[in-house]
Image (tube, rainbow, N blue to C red):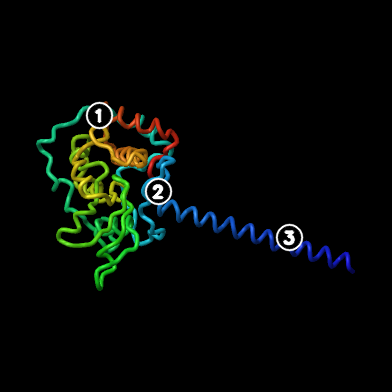
């Protein structure tokens, strides 16, 4: 009887240990998913020096994906770069912002405009305007381009401190294939969260319509992610790169050969 009871207790203890291990694995998996869709999608590209931790909110059920021209390819950003056509810039004299549709549409039809969607995605400690579930009134940004903390406060002047950057600028896209897209595709491009990041206002102004050959974030820890995101966007909308742009991207990716493409 004693031997049977001892064996029973051991089996019961092993069962509890097995359930504890299973619970830990499940928690780790859930935590990993939350990390990636929160800080992780920005942090995975960063070097050992650390860097920005943007978009801390793990639940993105309120923001729906949009449909690009083509899916973002799996694999490394360096591999995806090799699939992009290399051409010269087309003329820009016929470019106008209106060719990309109305600014900050509700492209995903979730009831909130794209600017507020991106603020909600990238800011922490969010505050909303009274009576609104969309209009972001304030929050903290772990800014990726210059690598510093910024406080966002909605206001006629204060809002300029945080701007929403098109990672592939609209003017750059126009000269590298977007002219051939349909008006609807260009509108989607301008409002695609894949191509949008909340950033430091002055840094965004300084970037202008520059590509990787003419402008890179001052925060070197973010450059791998930044270039990978540009490549992902260009692949998704079938845009091309110039020879100088490709060379600049390859130099950045040489420091992070395992950098993956950025997928929605």
**Pointers 1 and 3 in contact (C-beta within 8 Å):** no
Q: How many marks?
A: 3
Which residue is labeled 2 in the image? 41
Please rate how many residues cluster around mark 2, counting C-alpha atoms within 10 Å: few if below 14, some from 14 to 19, many from 20: some
Secondary-structure class at tag 2: helix
Q: Earlier in the sequence, mark 3 or mark 2?
A: 3
Identified at 21% across, 55% down, the residue is: 104
In the image, taking residue 242 as reference, residue 250 lies left or right, namely: right
The x, y position of residue 218, in whole percent, is 29, 40
Q: Could you say which disc has been placed on residue 19 in the image?
A: none
Q: Quadrant of residue 236?
A: top left
Secondary-structure class at tag 3: helix
**Pointers 3 and 2 in contact (C-beta within 8 Å):** no
Q: Earlier in the sequence, mark 1 or mark 3?
A: 3
Residue 213 higher or lower than 141, as above or below? above
Q: Could you say which disc has been placed on residue 14 in the image?
A: 3
The extreme left residue here reads 93
Q: Earlier in the sequence, mark 1 or mark 2?
A: 2
| Mark in the foreground, 1 or 3 | 3
Secondary-structure class at tag 1: loop
Measured Cα–Cα span from mark 1 to mark 2: 27 Å
Residue 20 higher or lower than 206, as above or below? below
Nearer the observer, 163 or 64? 163
Measured Cα–Cα span from mark 3 to mark 2: 38 Å
The x, y position of residue 6, in whole percent, is 83, 65
Identified at 12% across, 43% down, the residue is: 96
Which residue is labeled 1 in the image? 242
The x, y position of residue 148, in whole percent, is 31, 50
Nearer the observer, 175 or 14? 14
The x, y position of residue 5, in whole percent, is 84, 68
| Mark in the foreground, 1 or 2 | 2
């Amino acid at each position: 009887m004693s031997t049977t009871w001892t064996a029973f207790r051991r089996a019961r203890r092993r069962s509890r240990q097995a359930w504890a291990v299973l619970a830990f694995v499940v928690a780790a998996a859930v935590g990993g998913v939350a990390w990636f869709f929160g800080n992780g999608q920005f942090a995975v590209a960063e070097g050992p020096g650390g860097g920005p931790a943007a978009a801390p909110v793990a639940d993105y059920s309120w923001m729906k994906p949009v449909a690009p021209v083509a899916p973002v390819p799996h694999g490394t950003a360096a591999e995806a770069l090799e699939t992009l056509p290399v051409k010269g810039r087309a003329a820009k004299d016929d470019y106008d912002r209106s060719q990309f549709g109305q600014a900050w549409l509700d492209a995903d039809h979730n009831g909130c405009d794209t600017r507020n969607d991106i603020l909600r995605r990238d800011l922490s400690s969010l505050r909303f305007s009274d009576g609104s579930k969309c209009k972001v009134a304030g929050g903290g940004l772990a800014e990726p381009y210059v690598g510093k903390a910024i406080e966002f406060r909605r206001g006629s002047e204060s809002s300029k401190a945080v701007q929403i950057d098109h990672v592939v600028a609209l003017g750059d896209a126009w000269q590298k294939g977007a002219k051939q897209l349909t008006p609807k595709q260009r509108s989607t491009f301008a409002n695609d969260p894949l191509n949008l990041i909340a950033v430091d206002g002055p840094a965004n102004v300084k970037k202008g319509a520059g590509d990787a050959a003419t402008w890179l974030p001052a925060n070197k820890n973010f450059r791998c992610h930044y270039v990978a995101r540009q490549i992902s966007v260009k692949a998704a909308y079938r845009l091309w790169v110039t020879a100088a742009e490709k060379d600049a991207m390859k130099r950045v990716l040489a420091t992070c050969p395992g950098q993956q493409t950025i997928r929605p």
